[in-house]
Image: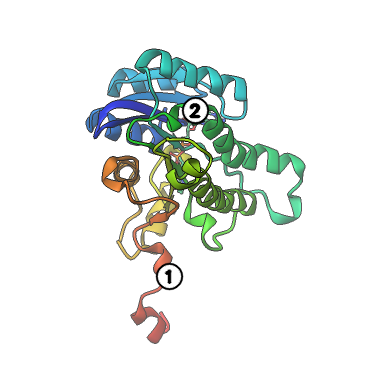
């Protein structure tokens, strides 16, 4: 979660998995745009260090433990008085081979990735509904949820986030809420689907990143800041007429891996 609030173009919000990588870059970007930000992560020391460096409220929570999520949301509202933006960023990928997928594999990966986002939205819901300019939820999906890139449990969970985003975009739209007698401005739900991004998740595999870079029409892999820019736009009031979308931020990966030349010349 990255929940931030305040002068962020009239909104504010919170984000999880914010101690490093994409979540941290999102928190930094929202903060730079004037949001009051809460960085939330299960790694207490790392999230404290990140908040110290980029500013914002550091909170510890595990998105698979709803009571800690509720406590994080309460702490944000106690500090900032409101919560307008939620960024669901946690994703767990273990690359379990298809034949080895069992209930534990789903729990370990789809638990935080898919159900974790559900719990964060549920916890933040009353505050998002009360946001003066309307609430905004941006969830980090993956190109793995859009096409076959392997890693089936993770990918299926990411694909599930697309359906979640679309359904919630309608369920909590201003129109549907008005039908239920509420005068809330509603909540926008959007999903950003990154391609390969240079983060610690790639660990000791810089060579893989160099190789992957050659597959991208943009000629490079993504940086966390590339994703943060898209999240900041979708979270902001500039995107007030955008809801229920999936935005690949992927250096062109979804256009296909090969150039026309490669296909014609069998390279
Ligand atoms: N890096 C990529 O190439 C890439 C590509 C596509 C999508 N994504 C997605 O972007 C998101 C962020 O990825 P990243 O590469 O920045 O990851 P990362 O591993 O660098 O950071 C993830 C953070 O989430 C925290 N975290 C993990 N489980 C948690 C839990 N249960 N509760 C609270 N915090 C938890 C970790 O402590 C860590 O700080 C993920 O959803 C990932 O699936 C990443």
| Rendered image: mark on residue 256 | 1
- Badge 1 residue CB within 8 Å of ligand 1: no
Describe the colour scheme in one phrase.
rainbow
The residue positioned 61% from the left and 44% from the top of the image is 94
Give the quadrant of residue 110. top right
Which residue in the rendered view is the most extreme toward the bottom?
Answer: 264
Question: Judging from the image, what secondary structure is the residue with disc 2 in?
Answer: helix
- Badge 2 residue CB within 8 Å of ligand 1: no
The residue positioned 38% from the left and 22% from the top of the image is 82
Question: Judging from the image, what secondary structure is the residue with disc 1 in?
Answer: loop
Q: Nearer the viewer, residue 1 or 92?
A: 1
In which quadrant of the rendered image does the C terminus lie?
Answer: bottom left
Q: Nearer the viewer, residue 238 or 264?
A: 238
Q: CA distance from mark 1 to mark 2?
A: 41 Å
> Looking at the picture, how far across and down is residue 244, in whole percent?
45, 52
The residue positioned 42% from the left and 83% from the top of the image is 266
> Looking at the picture, how far across and down is residue 24, in whole percent?
37, 32
Q: Nearer the viewer, residue 252 or 189?
A: 189
Which residue in the rendered view is the most extreme toward the top?
Answer: 78
Crowd band around label 1 with a 10 angstrom C-alpha radius: few (<14), some (14–19), many (20+): few
> Looking at the picture, how far across and down is residue 63, in whole percent?
56, 29
Earlier-in-chain disc, 1 versus 2: 2
Q: Is residue 194 above or below residue 88?
A: below
Quickly name the residue at label 2.
Answer: 126
> Looking at the picture, how far across and down is residue 34, in whole percent?
23, 28
The residue positioned 29% from the left and 33% from the top of the image is 30
In which quadrant of the rendered image does the N terminus lie?
Answer: top left
Q: Is residue 204 visible in this depiction of the protein? A: no
Q: Is residue 8 above or below residue 215?
A: above
Q: Is residue 26 visible in this depiction of the protein? A: yes
């Amino acid at each position: 979660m990255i929940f931030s609030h305040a002068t962020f173009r009239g909104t504010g919000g919170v984000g999880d998995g914010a101690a490093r990588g994409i979540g941290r870059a999102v928190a930094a970007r929202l903060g730079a745009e004037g949001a009051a930000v809460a960085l939330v992560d299960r790694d207490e020391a790392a999230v404290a260090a990140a908040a110290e460096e980029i500013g914002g409220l550091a909170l510890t929570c595990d998105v698979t433990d709803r009571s800690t999520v509720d406590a994080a949301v309460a702490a944000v509202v106690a500090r900032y008085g409101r919560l307008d933006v939620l960024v669901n960023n946690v994703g767990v990928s273990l690359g379990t081979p298809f034949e080895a997928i069992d209930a534990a594999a789903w729990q370990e990966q789809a638990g935080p990735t898919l159900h974790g986002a559900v719990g964060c939205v549920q916890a933040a819901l009353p505050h998002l509904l009360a946001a003066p300019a309307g609430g905004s939820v941006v969830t980090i999906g993956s190109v793995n949820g859009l096409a076959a890139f392997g890693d089936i449990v993770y990918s299926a969970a990411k694909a599930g986030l697309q359906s979640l985003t679309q359904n919630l975009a309608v369920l909590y739209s201003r129109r549907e809420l008005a039908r239920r007698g509420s005068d809330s401005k509603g909540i926008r739900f959007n999903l950003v689907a990154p391609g390969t991004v240079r983060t610690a998740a790639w660990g000791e595999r810089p060579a893989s990143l160099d190789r992957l870079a050659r597959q991208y029409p943009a000629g490079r892999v993504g940086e966390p800041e590339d994703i943060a820019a898209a999240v900041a736009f979708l979270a902001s009031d500039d995107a007030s007429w955008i809801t229920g979308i999936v935005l690949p931020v992927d250096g062109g990966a979804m256009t296909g891996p090969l150039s026309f030349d490669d296909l014609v010349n069998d390279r």
